[in-house]
Amino acid sequence: MSATSYSGAANAGPRPMSKEEKKVILASSLGTVFEWYDFYLYGSLAVVIGAKFFSMFDETTRNIFALLAFAAGFLVRPFGALVFGRLGDLVGRKYTFLVTILIMGASTFLVGVLPGSESIGITAAILLIVLRCLQGLALGGEYGGAATYVAEHAPHGRRGFYTSFIQITATAGLFLSLIVILGVRAALGEAAFADWGWRIPFLVSVLLLAISVWIRMQMQESPAFQKMKEEGTHSKAPIGEAFGQWKNAKIALLALLGLVMGQAVVWYTGQFYALFFLGSVLKVDGFTTNMLIAWSLLLGSGGFVLFGWLSDKIGRKPIILGGMLLAAVTYFPIFKLLSQEANPALHRAHSEIAVTVAADTARCSFQFNPTGTARFTDPCDIAKAALARLSVNYSVVNTPGSAVVVNIAGQQPISVVGNPQFAAQLGTAVTAAGYPAASNPSVVRMNGAFDIFRRDVLILIALLTVLVIYVTMVYGPIAAALVEMFPTRIRYTSMSLPYHIGNGWFGGLMPATAFAMIAQTGDVYYGLWYPIVIAVVCAVIGFFFVPESKDNDIDQADAR
């Protein structure tokens, strides 16, 4: 492919995608499949993996490993964006994201063959963390390279459409992981899966790796980067130029605050928080939760390409910001309808049964615990966390100087202090008051993958599909928008950092933040204020300060 194949394509009208362009998109997209495939694998199998690698150690050691695993999953990615973004702007897009896919794929596969701590002791846990950190670093460079590579090959006026295929593979990775986990569990049974079968989804990833590397080895460098290298206009210090000069750093900051942080919270709410809410709050069983999400992903994912294509016609901003605002306005009614259909008895209990915690509110903590290592031991915190885990709505009455007690619908108050039976008594009392028991027959339950032709299941799938459509609105055009904001010479570095800060930090911290907000207020829906506020703030900043980018000439090497 020559360096001029796609440059100067401003005169190119709509035409069928060429075979070479399809190969570019496929090669770039497989890395994003890997990213989200592994992300969900590790998250959903964390309990099993923890038992194999961490459970035999003391609590302090377990907490350290949990913190490091968390850091690898979220906090390390922006550093990977800097490392591989710099490499991509110095050496080239193709070489860099060939390196990232090799590191990422090998790390995922090796988790599946790594001996447990019962075989090699603490070395196993250390190696697992090393693999997770390597993977996190590689992930930080993967998305920026893929988006940049595809956009720099795309004809002018079709970048949104071309890059939307990268966006759809993020959901494809999540969907694939759901199917693999469900299939292996069903084939082996829970006992065998917990013993050794959990390794299979990690081992299967080697097929994705082999295909991806084979395709990427055949690709040529991006035309825009090749042209820049030939002209000698590439940056000698991409990180310093991108973030050390205010004229460029300002664009990266606006990309984060005016586009990416809102996109991130809508993305996580529509897919990961919906999963958490169904399973942890509404007490829907794991199979049904995964199948509901899988069906919604299958039905809604075409929106990635639709909104990517539409953004080439009307612009990136109207679609991305519109998705944020639609989500902010409708999240509360949608999640309340989810509650009403998924667990009607629990939904009624939330509005009909009064529960209060009498405590000195000055002693109550905000229970933000993203790593799972913090311990909240004050009686007020113990009471609130126990009620939140039971999905009970409650209010806190400030009673300074008094013992902490829980009052449930006029029953005998339950004391927390000096009561080793508190948790058991609490569970019995809320059930007696009218909250559904664990065996609640009204909770939705699917008996198979195609058990969808029931009113409650159809309504839930429809609601979850709407959430996925919001995801496609904010995420479908985002790659094109980010690529177009930065000049070629620092594009890889500049776009990668705000993307991974937004998605890794603003989005990744959502479940922990939402649970802390629920525990703080006693309202199972209160956690939704986190994505709503961020989405609205981001939409306002984006509307006033982020320029429309769809007509930008991305072949420019120099900063605008």
Image: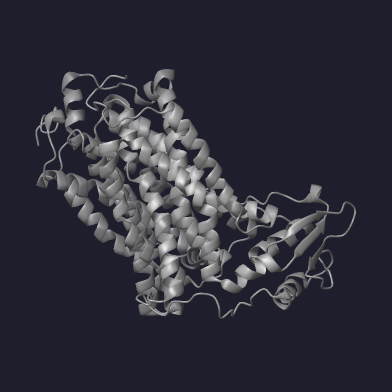
Residue occupying image coordinates x 50% and y 68% = 118
Instruction: Please state the total of marks drawn on the protein image.
Output: 0
Frontmost residue, 492 versus 476: 476
Quadrant in which the N terminus is drawn:
top left
Is 247 on the left or on the right of 285, as rendered? Answer: left
Frontmost residue, 426 versus 468: 468
Asked where in the image residue 236 lies, by quadrant, the reply is: top left
Instruction: State the image coordinates of residue 18 (x, y, percent, origin top left).
Output: 10, 45
- Rendered position, 456 above or below 469: below
Frontmost residue, 363 versus 161: 161
Quadrant in which the C terminus is drawn:
top left
Asked where in the image residue 339 lies, by quadrant, the reply is: bottom right
Frontmost residue, 169 versus 301: 301
Residue occupying image coordinates x 43% and y 61% = 464
**Residue 433 appears anywhere in the view:** yes
Instruction: State the image coordinates of residue 520 (x, y, percent, origin top left).
Output: 69, 52
Instruction: State the image coordinates of residue 427 (x, y, percent, origin top left).
Output: 71, 73
Instruction: State the image coordinates of residue 120 (x, y, percent, origin top left).
Output: 47, 63
